[in-house]
Structures are given as structure tokens and as C-alpha cells.
Image (cartoon, rainbow, N blue to C red):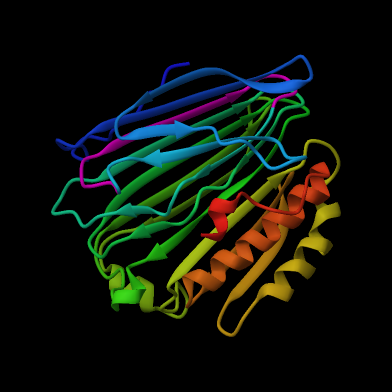
């Protein structure tokens, strides 16, 4: 495995170039680490999972956040039959920039019958932050995936909103080499106007996307249960929806409270890992900190 970060012209800076490469393989009836490479400020820890759960990896940004010009590459590879959950130790902070862009490239690859849960905690965009993040997921036949992300617009506890800066968040999911789903969120120019517009973000504090690629069966079979769980966790002002598209289940949230959105996201993730794989309806303790 080789972590490669492609930085668009004019976006790089003098920041760090961090890498986290992880590979798991199924051997002797268990999932075991088969490859690890890490470069500052990225580090990976492997705490023992709770009884009855799958292998666990935790990503850490040792710098405490990412600054303008930082470039991060995250690569994960699961061999046939490997099962793993990857999360982060804390919310990722993207600090204010005076021009350069923080670039994150995430490449996830799953062989047949592998199952990966990639559920990092939220990403907090400081006002004036500039972030380009691309996530690609390559699934072989029989592989399954549950993952997504939460974006928080500004440090709301300090009264800060995301009024200027840049965000490009892009996802691509491929099954046996064919693109089955692509999604991109692009904020540039008059960000304050876009954030306030009722037809856009309606002054929301946070948004989130969660996707499920079931290893077998039609994702439409999971929609009714997912909608029921999502509706139970919606609070005043928090909106959400679930649909099936391109062989995936896709859930969305938009709301005025990042903490309540995070709890709703976690509730549905717990339900889906149990519904799709028969795993315990829980997330690592880091999620409840």
C-alpha cells in the first residue's frame, strides 16, 4: 500500500504531509493487522474491541488539528473476509486559513466478503477554514461498508459560524470497478449567503451523511427500519431523510445543534450495523466522550 495525496495547483502550502495506511487480513478465523504505515501528524492506535465486536482502529491527529496547507492521506485495505471498524479519537478541527487549503484524501478498498465501518467523529470548520476532502470507496462483490461524516460549521459554543472560507467534500463509491454513487458539496464565494439561504443550509450548525452498502441483499430492505430510527431521534429543527440509490442506503441530516445531530447519526449507525451484519448495536466508547 502507498498513500498518495494529490494536491491541486495553488492549494498546497508549507504544512505537514501526514499519512495513515492500514490493512487488515482474515487469518485463522480472526481479522488481523497486516500492514501499518504512519507519518506525522497521523497516528493509529488499536484498542481492544468490546466483547463480541470486530477489530478496532483509531485515527489520531497528534497536532490537535489541521492548518492551511496540511495534506493528509488515509488509505485502508481489507482483505477477503476481514471485518473492521475505524474511527477517530476526537473531532477533527480545520483551522482558519489566509489562503492555502487543507487537503485530505481517503482511499478505502475492500475485497470480497470484507466489511468496513468508517465512522470518524465530526469535522469542525473554523470560520475562514479551507478544506478539500475526497473519499473513494472501492468494493468488490460481496463486500459491505457503513460510513459517512459529520460537518460542523463553526465553533458554535463560542458563537462562531462558518461565514467565509472554502469547502469541497466529495465521495465516490465503486462496486467491482463501476461507479454506483457520487456526491459532492462545494462551498465557495459568498459562503455566508449560502449558509443562511433557506433553500441551502438555512443557518444550520451541522450536516451529515451516512451510507450503507450491504454485503448482500437489496438496500431498499433497510429503508423502512432506518427511517423509523431516524424519526425517533429527530429533535426540533433537526431534519433528516433516508433513501436507497445505486445499491446504497443514504441517510442525511441538517440541523441547528451539532451534538443532537451527532447522537442521531450514531443511533442510526448502531441500528444499521446490527441490521446488516448482526453486530452489537453500539459504537466505540470514544463516540460517547
Q: Position of residue 174 (x, y in %)?
A: 62, 33
Q: Is residue 238 above or below residue 95?
A: below
In reply to whether residue 268 is colored magenta, the answer given is no
Residue drawn at x 27%, y 35% is: 8
Looking at the image, is 4 positioned above or below residue 170?
Answer: above
Q: Nearer the viewer, residue 235 or 180?
A: 235
- Image x and y of residue 139, in percent: 66, 29
- Residue 96 position within the rendered picture, expressed as x and y whole percent measured from the top left: 21, 57
Q: In this rendering, does residue 6 appear at all? A: no
Let me know if residue 120 appears in the view.
Answer: yes
Percent coordinates x, y for residue 161 in the rendering: 31, 73
Name the residue furthest bottom: 236
Residue 69, picture quadrant: top left
Is-magenta flag for residue 77?
yes
- Between 169 and 189, the residue placed more toward the observer is 169
Q: Along the line of sight, which residue is nearer the eye, 265 or 57?
A: 57
Residue at 33% over, 54% down:
93
Left or right, 133 with respect to 94, comes to right
Numbered-mark total: 0
Q: Residue at x 74, y 41 (%)?
A: 51
- Left or right: 211, with 66 as reference point: right
User: For the magenta stretch, what is the residue range?
Assistant: 65-82
Horizontal arrangement in the rendering, residue 9 relative to residue 36 (left or right): left
Q: Which residue sits at x=29%, y=35%?
A: 71
Q: Is residue 189 above or below residue 148?
A: below
Relative to 70, 58 lies left or right: right
Amino acid at each position: 500500500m502507498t498513500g498518495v495525496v494529490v494536491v491541486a495547483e495553488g492549494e498546497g502550502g508549507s504544512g505537514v504531509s501526514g499519512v495513515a495506511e492500514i490493512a487488515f487480513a482474515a487469518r485463522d478465523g480472526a481479522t488481523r493487522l497486516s500492514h501499518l504505515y504512519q507519518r506525522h501528524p497521523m497516528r493509529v492506535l488499536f484498542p481492544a474491541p468490546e466483547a463480541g465486536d470486530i477489530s478496532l482502529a483509531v485515527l489520531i491527529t497528534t497536532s490537535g488539528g489541521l492548518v492551511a496547507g496540511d495534506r493528509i492521506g488515509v488509505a485502508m485495505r481489507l482483505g477477503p473476509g476481514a471485518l473492521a471498524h475505524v474511527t477517530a479519537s476526537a473531532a477533527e478541527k480545520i483551522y482558519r486559513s489566509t489562503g492555502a487549503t487543507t487537503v485530505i484524501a481517503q482511499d478505502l478498498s475492500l475485497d470480497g466478503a470484507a466489511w468496513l465501518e468508517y465512522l470518524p467523529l465530526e469535522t469542525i470548520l473554523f470560520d475562514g477554514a479551507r478544506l478539500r476532502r475526497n473519499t473513494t470507496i472501492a468494493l468488490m462483490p460481496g463486500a459491505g461498508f457503513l460510513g459517512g461524516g459529520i460537518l460542523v460549521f463553526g465553533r458554535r459554543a463560542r458563537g462562531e459560524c462558518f461565514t467565509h472560507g472554502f469547502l469541497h467534500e466529495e465521495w465516490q463509491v465503486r462496486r467491482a470497478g463501476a461507479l454506483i454513487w457520487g456526491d459532492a458539496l462545494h462551498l465557495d464565494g459568498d459562503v455566508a449567503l449560502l449558509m443562511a439561504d433557506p433553500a441551502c443550509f438555512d443557518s444550520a450548525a451541522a450536516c451529515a451523511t451516512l451510507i450503507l452498502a450491504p454485503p448482500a441483499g437489496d438496500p431498499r430492505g433497510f429503508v423502512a427500519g432506518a427511517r423509523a430510527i431516524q424519526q425517533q431521534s429527530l429533535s426540533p429543527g433537526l431534519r433528516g431523510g433516508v433513501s436507497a440509490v445505486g445499491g446504497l442506503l443514504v441517510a442525511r441530516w441538517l440541523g441547528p445543534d451539532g451534538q443532537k445531530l451527532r447522537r442521531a447519526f450514531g443511533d442510526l449507525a448502531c441500528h444499521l450495523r446490527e441490521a446488516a451484519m448482526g453486530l452489537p448495536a453500539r459504537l466505540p466508547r470514544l463516540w460517547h466522550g
